[in-house]
């Protein structure tokens, strides 16, 4: 083992001992052997920049972790001393991926600055870019104790409405609803086709009818004004005077197809007035085709009431006067017969109308939707209507009435009508019986009397009517036809227009024969009874006839009133029905005029030339 020579010892060998010791770390020329100086031989901070020759220290000479931030001088590492892959990353155009630098990657000073927060008041309007503040950026937006947000109709969503006041507080602030009543709905309630006209006759209360045929819950809510139509003026501006064409931006409904507005107390259609973009005026429709159906050529217009400034108008809400004026009325809602499959939408729209009332009291009545012929038990349409009925019943409790179900179960008995075979089949399928309907869905005169009396009694029971007098039902009907099935002859019948009428024993619905209409030379052809004079003046005529005609053709029933001598006075026309090629029942009901002394039943093919058969006709007087 190498050692230093001992003082006073190693006589004769001390030189060899010293040389052996020095040879452990020195070369023959006195330089240090390689790897002689390691980390243990260097004192901390003993190696300075001046003592290191340029390029003298390779990677292999530096221990892992030996060089930290404090050992590298600012600017000491230039791009030339970076590895190739680092140079590539340094010069790449890509930026750091979102979220790739977490707070933990920052030094303590940076973290402290990050968490120091922004001083109150330091972000001014000028510091914010347009559109920079979105709803998600707002703390607690739409939440309790947070900032309120508006929906697309510029209203507070239901879940952000303030807590409701007590009934006493509401009465003190707004007063109770009424005494006037407003009806909102579709053709089941509308003037003429619905029960509203009859309901007015049961009470001294003033009743306004805002129902319009063909509308869905969304169209009704827009008409009320709670979820308004949004209109844009063509060109973007309402002119200083006159009219401008407007387009409907939302919702995807088409107003005014069955009337120019809503109905006043007398049931006459009023002008659809209101305001658009703050401008008062009238909303109107110019039809290009058939009423009740939207055509591509239909054009809507807004006509301002008085001259004023040119006004921007893009997707602005149309706010109708009628709905706003009736907010304080007792509400009767018969909504959901049209598009009852949209249950969520219908429930939401009805709820919005109920909440839109000025007084949030319980002065309202919600009625069930109707199904029609062919939409009975086991069909998808029936399931939709029943599901909607059940949801309405659960939501509105004592303020809900299942009028449809009552008419099915009790209507005929209430009116003193003996059910026919067809009526019994209807009721078995949970459909309003044929004897109470004017067509596949709508009620006839007796059906509307029943509905008016039922609704009137319900309003009285709820304390919402000052008085109520039920309307009387017609006496039991009398069959006026003596040869309804053409079994032995065509007695009592004749042709209409230029058609040829024969008895057909090869095609019939029941029995052994039917009437066959052929040889028409005009767009209308058919058969009719000879004048039938009244022994006792009836109030209502109800008719039906089974028709078999080529698919795609059309047919209808007419009632002609005559004087006591059989002379023609006037005509009441039923609905035109598209035929399927199979036997179909046409029905029609009309009120009898005071000067009528008799009637003629007519079955017509319309709009084209075709042959058809008629069987099992009926004309009953009530």
Image: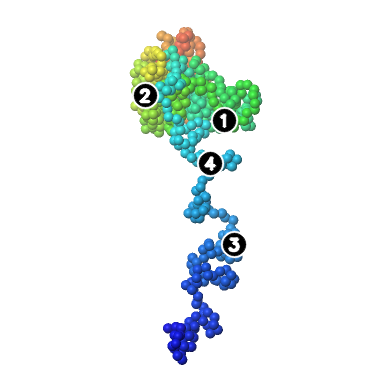
Q: Percent position (x, y) of residue 105?
A: 49, 55
Q: Mark 3 or mark 2, which has the lower sequence index?
A: 3
Q: Mark 1 or mark 3, which has the lower sequence index?
A: 3
Under tag 2, what secondary structure?
helix
| Numbered disc in front, either 4 or 2 | 4
The 10 Å Cα crowd at callout 3, few under 14, some 14 to 19, many 20 or more, is few
Look at mark 2 in the image and give the residue it sits on. 398
Q: Mark 4 or mark 1, which has the lower sequence index?
A: 4
Q: Of 452 and 74, which appears nearest the observer?
A: 74
**In which image quadrant can residue 351 be found?**
top left
Q: Mark 1 or mark 2, which has the lower sequence index?
A: 1
Look at mark 3 in the image and give the residue it sits on. 75
Question: Which residue of the protein is positioned furthest toward the front in this rendering?
Answer: 8
Q: Is residue 567 left or right of residue 476?
A: right
Q: Percent position (x, y) of residue 130?
A: 59, 40
Look at mark 4 in the image and give the residue it sits on. 120
Under tag 3, what secondary structure?
loop
Under tag 1, what secondary structure?
strand
- 3D distance between C-alphas at marks 4 and 2: 53 Å
Is residue 223 shown to the viewer in this render? yes
- 3D distance between C-alphas at marks 1 and 2: 38 Å
- Dividing the image into 4 quarters, which one contains the N terminus? bottom left
Q: Mark 4 or mark 2, which has the lower sequence index?
A: 4
Under tag 4, what secondary structure?
loop
Q: Mark 3 or mark 4, which has the lower sequence index?
A: 3
Q: Report if the CB atoms under discs 4 and 2 are less than 8 Å apart.
A: no
- Dividing the image into 4 quarters, which one contains the C terminus? top left
């Amino acid at each position: 083992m190498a050692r230093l020579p001992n003082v006073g010892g190693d006589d004769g060998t001390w030189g060899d001992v010293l040389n052996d010791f020095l040879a452990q770390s020195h070369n023959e020329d006195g330089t240090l052997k390689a790897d002689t100086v390691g980390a243990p031989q260097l004192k901390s901070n003993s190696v300075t920049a001046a003592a290191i020759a340029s390029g003298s220290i390779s990677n292999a000479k530096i221990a892992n972790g030996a060089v930290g931030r404090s050992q590298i001088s600012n600017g000491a590492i230039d791009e030339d001393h970076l590895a190739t892959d680092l140079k590539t990353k340094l010069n790449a155009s890509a930026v750091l991926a979102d979220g790739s630098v977490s707070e933990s990657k920052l030094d303590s000073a940076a973290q402290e600055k990050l968490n120091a927060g922004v001083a109150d008041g330091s972000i001014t309007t000028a510091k914010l870019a347009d559109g920079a503040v979105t709803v998600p950026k707002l703390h607690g937006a739409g939440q309790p104790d947070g900032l309120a947000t508006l929906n697309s109709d510029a209203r507070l969503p239901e879940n952000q409405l303030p807590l409701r006041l007590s009934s006493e507080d509401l009465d003190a602030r707004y007063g109770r609803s009424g005494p006037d009543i407003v009806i909102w709905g579709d053709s089941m309630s509308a003037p003429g086709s619905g029960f509203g006209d009859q309901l007015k006759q049961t009470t001294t209360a003033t009743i306004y009818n805002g129902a319009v045929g063909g509308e869905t819950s969304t169209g009704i809510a827009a008409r009320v004004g709670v979820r308004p139509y949004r209109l844009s003026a063509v060109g973007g501006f309402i002119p200083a005077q006159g009219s401008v064409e407007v387009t409907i931006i939302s919702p995807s409904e088409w107003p005014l197809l069955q009337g120019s507005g809503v109905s006043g107390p007398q049931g006459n259609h009023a002008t659809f007035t209101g305001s658009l973009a703050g401008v008062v005026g009238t909303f109107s429709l110019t039809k290009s085709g058939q009423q009740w159906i939207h055509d591509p050529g239909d054009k809507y217009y807004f006509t301002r009431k008085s001259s004023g400034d040119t006004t921007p108008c893009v997707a602005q809400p149309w706010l109708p006067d009628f709905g706003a004026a009736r907010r304080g009325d007792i509400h009767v809602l018969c909504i959901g017969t049209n598009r009852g499959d949209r249950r969520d939408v219908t429930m939401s729209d009805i709820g919005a109308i109920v909440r839109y009332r000025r007084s949030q009291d319980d002065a309202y009545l919600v009625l069930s939707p109707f199904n029609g012929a062919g939409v009975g038990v086991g069909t998808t349409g029936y399931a939709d209507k029943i599901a909607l009925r059940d949801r309405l019943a659960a939501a509105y409790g004592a303020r809900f009435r299942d009028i449809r179900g009552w008419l099915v179960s009790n209507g005929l008995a209430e009116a003193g009508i003996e059910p026919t075979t067809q009526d019994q089949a209807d009721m078995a399928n949970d459909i309003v019986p044929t004897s109470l309907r004017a067509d596949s869905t709508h009620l006839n005169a007796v059906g509307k009397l029943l509905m008016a009396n039922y609704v009137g009694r319900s309003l009285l029971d709820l304390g919402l009517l000052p008085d109520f007098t039920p309307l009387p039902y017609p006496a039991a009907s009398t069959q006026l036809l003596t040869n309804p099935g053409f079994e032995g002859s065509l007695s009592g019948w004749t042709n209409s227009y230029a058609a040829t009428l024969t008895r057909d024993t090869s095609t019939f619905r029941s029995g052994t024969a039917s009437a066959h209409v052929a040889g028409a030379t005009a767009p209308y052809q058919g058969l009719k009874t000879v004048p039938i004079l009244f022994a006792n003046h009836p109030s209502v005529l109800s008719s039906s006839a089974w028709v078999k005609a080529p698919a795609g053709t059309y047919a209808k029933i007419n009632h002609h009133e005559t004087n006591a001598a059989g002379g023609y006075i006037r005509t009441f026309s039923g609905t035109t029905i598209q035929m399927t090629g199979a036997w179909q029942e046409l029905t029609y009901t009309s009120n009898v005029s005071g000067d009528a002394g008799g009637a003629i039943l007519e079955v017509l093919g319309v709009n084209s030339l075709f042959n058809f058969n008629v069987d099992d006709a009926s004309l009953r007087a009530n």
